[in-house]
Amino acid sequence: MSGSADLNRNRAVDWALMAYIVLAYAFVFAPIAASFVFSFNSDRFPSIPLGEFSLDWYRAVATDPLVWEGARNTLVVGVIVGVISTVLGFGAAYTDFRYSFFGKQIYLALALLPPTIPVIILGLAMLAYLSRVNLSGDALSVIISHVVVCAPFAMAIIRLRLSQMDPALEPAAWNLGASEWKAMRHVIIPFTMPAILGALFITMAVSFDEFAVAWFVSGLNETLPVKVLGFLQGQVSPRINAIGTFVFILSMTLVILAQLLLSGRGAGQTSADKE
Amino acid sequence: MQRDTLVSFEGVVKRFGDFVAVQKLDFEIRKGEFLAIMGSSGCGKTTTLRMLAGLEGPSEGVIRLSGKPINDLPTWSRDTPMVWQSLALFPFLNVRENVEFALKMRGVGKVERRRRAEQWLDRMQITEFAERNISQLSGGQRQRVALARSLVVEPEILLLDEPLSALDAALKVRMQSVLKNLQRETGITFVYVTHSQSEAFSMADRVVIMSRGKIEQIGTPQEIYRTPRTRFVADFLGSSNLFTGKVRSDGQGLALDTPVGQLALAPGATNDIGDTATLTVLDTKTHLSISAPTGSVNVVPVRVIGEEFVGATATLYLETAHGQEIRVQKGHDELADLPLGTGQSLYAWWNPQDSHLVAEA
């Protein structure tokens, strides 16, 4: 950085902040790291000193048809949930961006409400409601429930991007001969694309990881997190560590992809004035 | 309607809820002219432009383009491209794609699109930036892209909403001449909204001055400058000294009884005796001398309170015994013989022929 930035910084504060960040991350990631390490450990129980390096647990997981079934359910549900949530989230965010109407604050509050409801209550409510309409225990019921949880995230992400857009951009497109649909296709969607993809990945990741609601409504179509609980209830197996590592890497990949899209070059047009 | 009228506003009113943004607008825009609409913020100038562009619908009245009413035409069906204050260039498209946008929306084929965009890139001297992102351009280059993007459809009229407001002073002046030349060469009607007197007066063939949703005056820059029609215009331009008082007869002609004394009106003034009126005289037509001038001139004793030099001209700020400020603008050499220290007593004077009365409203 430039000299003036160095000049006005206190080294001790810099170091303290750096140490703080390192410690905070260590605290957050230690359990995950432990799970990761033990997934490669030959011992039956997680203890130190470690045994030998081994891929046994991964092998055990890979040959378990129940795990595969769970993984397939998770993936199918996650992809569908991601797509539906993003479409709904986009619609809700664009409505907020484009229109002002009576009761808009209430509309926004309701649209952003679901993630604030405790998942146990949401799961119970979903189960009660879906079984009433004969949908419970179906993969569809997991999809519906997860869309309810995920769509607000998609909306929030896309709404943020739209708020960075020059409000004259869309009228400018109309003014240059674009109908509303063409402006949507050629201006609004290209501009929001980083956020749309970001929302897609984030909502997929949320769906992959979501346990409580899926546990209530999934019935026989258990997703991977629900399966994991099943394993834990039977026995504590290092296979959990292997699955955990796999799910963690998948989710993190999606989240990092989303992060890159949302903060990357595509989103950087607002800070465009340096030459 | 005149033959060379391109746009006419007929009794146009725009309300936003209870707020009347534009009241009873009646004026015409002539084919091929550079028209500036000027006023301070909130005067209705941008609303007027947006109604013409089809971004707002009038609450009352008719707007005609080439004789046809366009009230109900959505903006994408009008050929009224606009250059936005923020420029509103598409950040996810490069320069060429920005320029091609309007053609693409109109379904022009790829080859033709490229050819026509090329012409305007060349004309605006931005061909070398064609493949660049908008974020890589300087302010002046962006202006040129915005112009090319609007003009590529070769419209009859171009609307400009304070497009130069983000530029620094030197670039502003350069872009003014670019705009003026472009308008002259293409013959396209330009409607230019601005709050800046210097922009309006240096480029426009005619200027519309608006205040609180109404037109105060329409005319050439010279007409408006020399004879502001209303008190608002005279105040807004800030280049005249104003004196308000009651009209009376002074034997030979009419005069105005003002706090600074009795001021003779220009011969031919026809106001009723007893009316309240405001006399204006340009600061360049107001003179100074050390001793009271004689002859049939209006004289006001003043004291110097400040001076300001810009280039070859000086602006002197003076104060009457009643605390009214008077400005005088002169070349340096005209002031050479005068003592101009603060507090110095002088006489400001002008020829009654150089003054005129303005409407109060």
Image: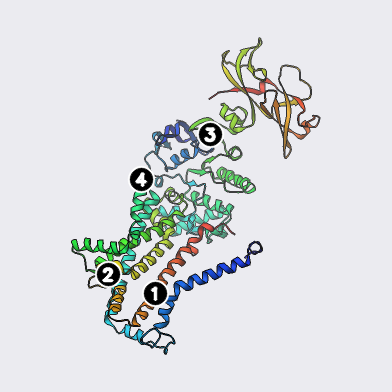
Percent position of residue B149, x then y = 49, 52
The structure residue drawn at horizontal position 30% and vertical position 69%, both measured from the top left corner, is: A77
Q: Which residue is mark 3?
A: B208
- Image quarter of the N terminus of chain A: bottom right
Classed neighbour count for the residue bearing mark 3: other residues with Cα under 10 Å, few (<14), some (14–19), many (≥20): many
Same-subunit check for callouts 1 and 3: no
Percent position of residue B45, x then y = 50, 37
Asked if residue A41 lies left or right of residue B347, the reply is left
- In this rendering, the answer to whether A270 lies above or below B41 is below
Asked if residue B23 lies left or right of residue B331, the reply is left
Chain of the residue where label 2 is placed in the rendered structure: A
Q: Which residue is mark 1?
A: A248
The structure residue drawn at horizontal position 52% and vertical position 62%, both measured from the top left corner, is: B131
Does label 1 or label 2 sit earlier along the sequence?
Answer: 2
Same-subunit check for callouts 4 and 1: yes
Q: Which mark is residue A215?
A: 2
Does label 4 or label 1 sit earlier along the sequence?
Answer: 4
Same-subunit check for callouts 1 and 2: yes
Mark in the foreground, 3 or 4: 4
Residue B81 seen in the current view: yes
Chain of the residue where label 1 is placed in the rendered structure: A
Q: Amino acid at mark 1?
A: Phe
Q: Amino acid at mark 3?
A: Val
Q: Nearer the viewer, residue A181 or B5?
A: A181
Are the residues flagged by discs 2 and 4 in contact, CB closer than 8 Å? no
Q: Which residue is mark 4?
A: A101
Same-subunit check for callouts 3 and 4: no
Q: Amino acid at mark 2?
A: Trp
- In this rendering, the answer to whether B193 lies above or below B149 is above
* Mark pair 3, 2: CA separation: 70 Å
Give the quarter of the image for residue A126.
bottom left
The structure residue drawn at horizontal position 55% and vertical position 53%, both measured from the top left corner, is: B142
